[in-house]
Amino acid sequence: MKNKKRFLKLIAVITVAMIMVFSLASCAMGGGTSSASDANGTHGSLTWDYKKDGQTLTITGSGTMTSFTGTEDVAWADVVTSVKKVVVGSGVTTVGDYAFFGMTQLSEVSLPDTVTAIGKLSFAYTPALTGIDLPDSLSSVGYGAFETSGLTAIALPASVTAISDRAFMYCNDLTAVTGSGVMSVGAEAFAYCSALDSIKLAEGATASATAFDNAKTNKITVVDNKITIIYKFVDAADTAKDIKASESVSMDANAESYIYKAPEIAGYTAVKTDIMVTPTDVNQTVVVTYNKVEEEPETEAPVDTDQTAGSEDDGKLEPMTIVALVVTVLIIIGIIVGTILFIRHDKKNAGKGTTVRKNKDEKGANKDKKNTKNKK
């Protein structure tokens, strides 16, 4: 009996232990996937909205994003550890200090071409953030902006001329940095970047004595400012359809914006004939779209009734023409015959008149002779 009780206790202990193990394992596996509930609010002139579905934080409005003094007073503090994606809407001009600090799940960021400055420690301690596209409008990257982030490479737009202190400090996965406009690098900007292999900056760029402390390399090379622009010509109704072979042009990445004239293509008309092209630090593709010209339906050529060239019927008279000619000839003949008859008749009458007058004259003469005799 005692052995049975001991056995049951042992089974109970083992069962409890297994339940605890499974509970701890479940917590460990699910701890990084929890997400805060939907939330929203305002921050200065901006509005923010967090959606649990997609774990996305969207910030909209216009003007500057007021900086925060620390992680505690961030407007969206309750969702910081749940955010995976940040979308900053067009019209926002700055990313405030500490704005996205400590977002451990953040892996995707979308910044508009209205942003000109990224504030102090704004993306610091974001280990899941392996890449970010910085807008060409950006001119300033603040102190520790990407410190201890998961970036593997960074391409700074030509408008950024300086890298602030500690901007990329402790970015252990960062391997390559490009900044065609960067002329100065601040203290500890790339300190402890243990994987850093390539640093390409503007010719004549200088760095602080501690800029590359404990980094894999501190060798700055001049960035290759040559880029390739590829022009693709596609049908607007089917953009996957190339209607002309692509053209590529090599040019200076710092070149000024220019107008590209869409070439003429038989059977098509360009949607836009003048296209604004702005060179960037990387190779780019410019898509030129065309509308297909609708072919007009074929129509029979009109019959030319006024024929100038000879034909088989040339020289042949139409029936009505023959009739008209016959009538005309008959009329002419009639006129001639009538004229002749009239002349003959007139002559005949003239002859009769002469005879009558002669007879009258003879009678008158005889009468005169008779009267003369009687008088005698």
Image: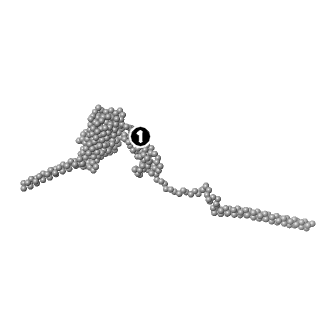
**Height in image: 107 above or below 302?**
above
Looking at the rendering, in which quadrant would you find the C terminus?
bottom right
**Residue 80: x percent and y percent?**
25, 44
Question: Where is residue 345 shown, x and y percent of the image?
Answer: 77, 65
Res 214 → quadrant: top left
Quadrant of the snapshot with the N terminus: bottom left
Disc 1: which residue: 250
In which quadrant of the rendered view does residue 162 lie? top left
Instruction: Name which residue type carries label 1.
Output: Ser
Within 10 Å of the Cα at label 1, are there few (<14), some (14-19), or many (20+) other Cα atoms?
few
- Specify how the rendered protein is coloured: one colour
- The percent coordinates of residue 234 (x first, y second) are 42, 49
Residue 124 seen by the camera: no
Q: Residue at x 38, y 37 (%)?
A: 225
Label 1 sits on a secondary structure element that is: strand
In the drawing, does residue 291 fall left or right of residue 76?
Answer: right
Q: Is residue 18 left or right of residue 205?
A: left
Specify whether residue 372 is in view: yes
**Relative to 87, is 8 on the left or the right?**
left
